[in-house]
Amino acid sequence: MGEAIGAVLGYAVGIAISPVPIAAVILMMFSERSRTNSLSFMVAWVVGIATATTVVLLLPGVDTGDSTPSDTTGWIKLVLGLLLFVGAVAQWRKRPGPDEEPPMPAWMAKIEVLEPLKTFGLGFVLSAINPKNLLLAAAAGVTIGSTPLSSGETVATVIAFTLIAGITVIAPVVAFLVAGDRIDDKLDAAKDWLMANNAAVMAVLFVIFGASLLGDAISILGS
């Protein structure tokens, strides 16, 4: 199981450093329903990551029941690797210049008036359907699914992956519930740094993950 967790650790970190959910949950902490909305978003974020990962690892042909990955796994990794390279180019092109303010999504302006149910929906969409997260969660799912693990080990690996991937949303919410307004400045500074540097960081990570997936795919399909 430790080997499986190690294999998906990079994908979890890639999801964790996404600035959009961090910025969103921080903005929720300044809304009228700050505690309820931030908790709702956090739960949805975790559920979304776990759902996307689990759906992929349960795809027919991913789990062969032995130590040899199937051709299905190889083809999925090949497609994901290519998509990550495309994502790397897109991320690099949209990185802000040295003197540019990174753009904030228009929907963030409405966060303060969202109700908990809509907040939950937003969190689920951002974690499970957002293309960047979906690619990384899918890569993790196919990696876990193709690793010879027992049912209990598979569940434990998905849980570990989900917690690591969600830590940058979980930690601020827990800190806010415990410390309240005393951490506002630190959270805001963290959000600003991630928004300013995320595109370049994600472009590099996408290239690394894409190369790794393509290498795995070539190895599997060529054997």
Image: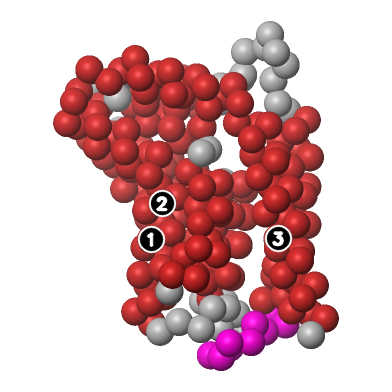
Q: Quadrant of residue 169?
A: top left
Examine the structure image and report whether residue 178 is included in the region drawn in magenta. no
Picture coordinates of residue 223, whole percent (x, y): 79, 85
Q: Is residue 9 left or right of residue 223?
A: left
Q: Residue at x 68, y 32 (%)?
A: 200
Q: Residue furthest left?
A: 178
Instruction: Determine which residue is flagged by label 1.
Output: 160
The disc placed on residue 164 is 2
Q: Amino acid at mark 2?
A: Ile
- Image quarter of the N terminus: bottom left
Magenta stretch, main secondary structure class: loop
The disc placed on residue 190 is none
Q: Are marks 1 and 2 in contact (CB under 8 Å)?
A: yes
Q: Residue furthest bottom?
A: 66
Badge 2 crowding class, 10 Å Cα cut-off, few under 14, some 14 to 19, many 20 or more, is many
- Residue nearest the viewer, comparing 95 with 42: 95
Q: Is residue 145 left or right of residue 43?
A: right
Q: Quadrant of residue 215?
A: bottom right
- Magenta stretch bounds: 64-72
Instruction: Determine which residue is flagged by label 3.
Output: 212
Badge 3 crowding class, 10 Å Cα cut-off, few under 14, some 14 to 19, many 20 or more, is some
Q: Is residue 185 left or right of residue 52?
A: left
- Of labels 3 and 2, earlier in sequence is 2
